[in-house]
Image: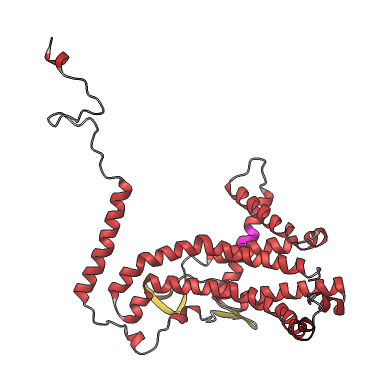
Amino acid sequence: MSAIAERPAATAETPPDPGGADPSPQRGMSARRRLALIVAAVWIGGTIVLAVVLGIKSHKAAAIVKGQFSPIDEFKLDAYTHIGPIAINKGVIFVLLTAIITIGVMGYVARKMQIRPNRVQALVEGLYVFARQMARDNLDDQLFRKYFPLIATLFVFILVTNLIGYIPLPLETSNTFNVFGAHIPAFQIYAADTNVAFPLILALMVFVIFNYEGVRHHGPVGYFKSLIPEVGPGAMQQFVVKPLILVIEPMSVFLRLLSLTIRLWANLLAGHLLIAFMGGELGVLVGQPFISWFLLPLGVAIYVFEATLIAVLQAFIFAILSAIYIGDSVHSH
């Protein structure tokens, strides 16, 4: 019998021959893992190099030392020019950009409708269906036919202005850089929502509409009564709880105006401030370049989170609350 025939067959219980070749080939490191390790090495190594080379002594710029720079400068609305009494600033430019993009895309899709939609048409149709469901769930048939265009417009308009607010544009006139003798405003991300006047105007429009519908449906006195929920017959409810409700419930109507305004304004403003601070501004303010480098990945992560989730979420919340408030105005508590 040959040596090959005499060699026992390998089984699950038989350990591998240490002198033989490994039947499973060695797998190299994946490209994704290799890239992650390189990025981590550059990130940590860059932080250490900057800290060692520049030290931990503050290196504040002259503008910061003199108090000529502030993180809120980028949100100031310096006028570029005037058209009569209207000041053209970056807030106005962003609103106009939003209107042009929204009308342009919707008009293009309306003219180019196809049975087999392209990506742009599919996206617009998805937004339409989403806004339609949002309005249908919160408005009766009559109010739905009347106010669905408003709810859909609010959702799309706020969504577009939020999204373009994460595109860096040369808008910060307080800081400029020289290009062949021309002083170009520094690039920054800015959203019209970070100016409280923008969400306030939208909220005022919704506030007027739902109060108008409430008075129209119930009458002035009936509308006020519809805001007051019924309380129990006990003395405690009648003489303590009911007077409090008579004050609190009508006040809550005005709080809706504030909630619509502040929720949209504060979330977008806080997000943009976080991106600026984590993206390098904090290191500039304290005069420590290695802090800017160390926090940069966090700034990128916040940027992606804000641009992909918060921009959509805040547009959805404003639109659905508007639908809820309008639909609720014709119902008694």
Q: Is residue 103 above or below residue 189?
A: above
Side of 328 where 32 appears, left or right: left
Residue 309: where, in percent of width, then height?
Answer: 52, 61
Give the residue at the far front of this rendering.
234
Q: Is residue 83 above or below residue 97?
A: below
Residue 306: where, in percent of width, then height?
Answer: 49, 65
- Magenta-drawn segment: 99-104
Residue 284: where, in percent of width, then height?
Answer: 34, 78
SS majority, magenta: helix
Question: Can the viewer see residue 278 in this picture?
Answer: yes
Give the camera-side residue of 59 and 51.
51
Q: Is residue 331 above or below residue 32?
A: below
Residue at 21 percent of width and 76 percent of height:
54
Question: Can the viewer see residue 181 in this picture?
Answer: no
Residue 100 magenta-highlighted: yes
Give the residue at the far top of this rendering.
1
Residue 97 magenta-highlighted: no
Asked where in the image residue 93 lies, by quadrant, the reply is bottom right
Residue at 67 percent of width and 41 percent of height:
115
Give the residue at the far bottom of this rendering.
66
Q: How many marks?
A: 0
Instruction: Pick the quarter of the image with the C terminus.
Output: bottom right
Instruction: Pick the quarter of the image with the N terminus.
Output: top left
Give the camera-side residue of 115 and 22.
22
Side of 257 where 298 appears, left or right: left
Residue at 45 percent of width and 61 percent of height:
304
Render colour scheme: secondary structure
Residue at 67 percent of width and 54 percent of height:
128
Residue 11: where, in percent of width, then height?
Answer: 24, 25
Q: Is residue 157 above or below residue 266?
A: above
Side of 193 where 222 appears, left or right: right
